[in-house]
Image (cartoon, grey):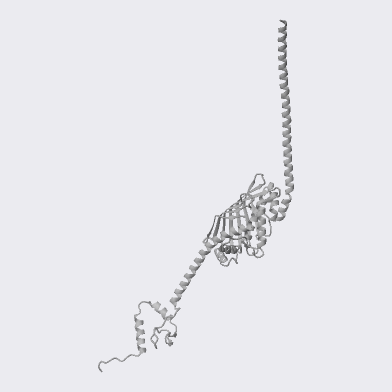
Amino acid sequence: GGQGVPRPRSKAAMVKTRNAKLTEGEDSDSDDDNGSEEESQDAGPCHQCGRELPPDCDFCPKCGVQRQKARFDFKDKKVRCACGCTTTCIIFAILTIIAIFSFNAWLKLAIEQVGGGLLGVGVSMDSVNFGFAQGRVSITDMVVGNPKEFQGDFMSLGRFVFDVGPLSLLWGYLSSFEKPIVLEEMTVLDLGVLISLDMFPQTTSNAGEIVTHMQQVTQAIAPGLATPPPMPDAKTAVDLGIKAMTAKIEVDRLELSNISASVKISALPAVQYTLQRIVITDIGKKHGGVYLYEFMQILVEAILMSIIKAAPSNVQSFLASAFGKDLGSELDFAMLHFDTGEGLEEVGEFSGWVTAQAALLPLKMAATSASMTEQAMEVGAKITGMEADASLAATKTQAELGLKAAQTMAKLSMGFTNGLTQALTR
């Protein structure tokens, strides 16, 4: 009946009281969050003693250990999802930046090294710039040199611009270019071409030597890209160069504008003419893309074919005979057009046409020689006539001078005789 020592409570009652107090005193979390947490508690064993715990129990009734939260409750899942998405975006951005800088270096190396090895002459450029947001690549001041026995540069390109699908480029690069890079449109501005022909003792030309070297290289590497053109000794350069050799490209449309051509035959004055446009369509569409070296071959041969077709008649057969017969092989593009100011004209079937033009060269040279001989004869006749007139004039002048001299001598003689007679008669 009096105050006494309270009876000890059972362990289960203590756990129940503690759970009630904790439930009543939770102020830090909102009702929605509590509801979410309670819903997230799944039935499962206690991590300490192994007793099965109900979903609404925070402490184990047996051992009193606080229950561990589920690893993947709703809130954690949201955080983990956000973190995963953020990490993915960061990785993608880093890969994109690396791809851009790597692509700039790769493209410059590819054009200079693969182009130089393919053409057998020096190839250089001022800069390469890839705008990822616009999907546009620009190359400025690209120069293709001449073989060592010829002066000047073979080609100069002021600006080379092409649009590329960013995803196509990224996936192509990451897959070592097993998939072709799709280039929607390419433009070349301010193209200059210098063709030098030496007719004696035999016909040689800078374009002919470059085309021959190019075709020898493509025939060597085409069977399986087993013999790529010469690459730098540095390991990175070699790796990138080999990757560049295996890159495939598809181009919907390539347009070159403002083309100036200069043809110099031996010691004769250069013949200069212009083309407004050269248009090549559907490059690499027949066989799922073309390799980089094949694309360069298509570009060079298309330019030279257009220049021969547009050339003035007095040099056309010389160009056809010097190197034109080596052009027009089976290349992976659909159509080739050129414009000299009167609208686009299709190059058409080139091999037969250029062979006929080359066959006309001896006739044209004979006609030119005959014309020169006729002109020389006319000049000679004029000179002979001038000489005859000069001789006749000289003879006439000499006769007139002789007559005057004779008259003067006669007068002197008569005067002397008269004077002497007068003197004797005195």
What quarter of the picture does the N terminus occupy?
bottom left
Q: Is residue 267 above or below residue 51?
A: above
Q: Nearer the viewer, residue 420 or 39?
A: 420
Q: How far across and how far down the image is residue 328, in percent?
A: 68, 57
Q: How far across and how far down the image is residue 174, in percent?
A: 56, 67
**Splitting the image into 4 quarters, where does residue 334 fall?**
bottom right
Residue at point 73% right, 32% down? 385
What quarter of the picture does the C terminus occupy?
top right
Locate residue 62 relative to residue 347 in the image: left or right.
left
**Splitting the image into 4 quarters, where does residue 402 fall?**
top right
Q: Nearer the viewer, residue 1 or 201?
A: 201
Q: Nearer the viewer, residue 180 or 56?
A: 180
Q: Is residue 127 above or below residue 27?
A: above
Q: How far across and how far down the image is residue 290, in percent?
A: 63, 62
**Splitting the image into 4 quarters, where does residue 423 fall?**
top right
Q: Nearer the viewer, residue 198 or 270?
A: 198
Q: How far across and how far down the image is residue 396, in percent?
A: 73, 24
- Residue 11 in sight in this render: yes
Residue at point 65% right, 52% down? 206
- Residue 253 in sight in this render: no
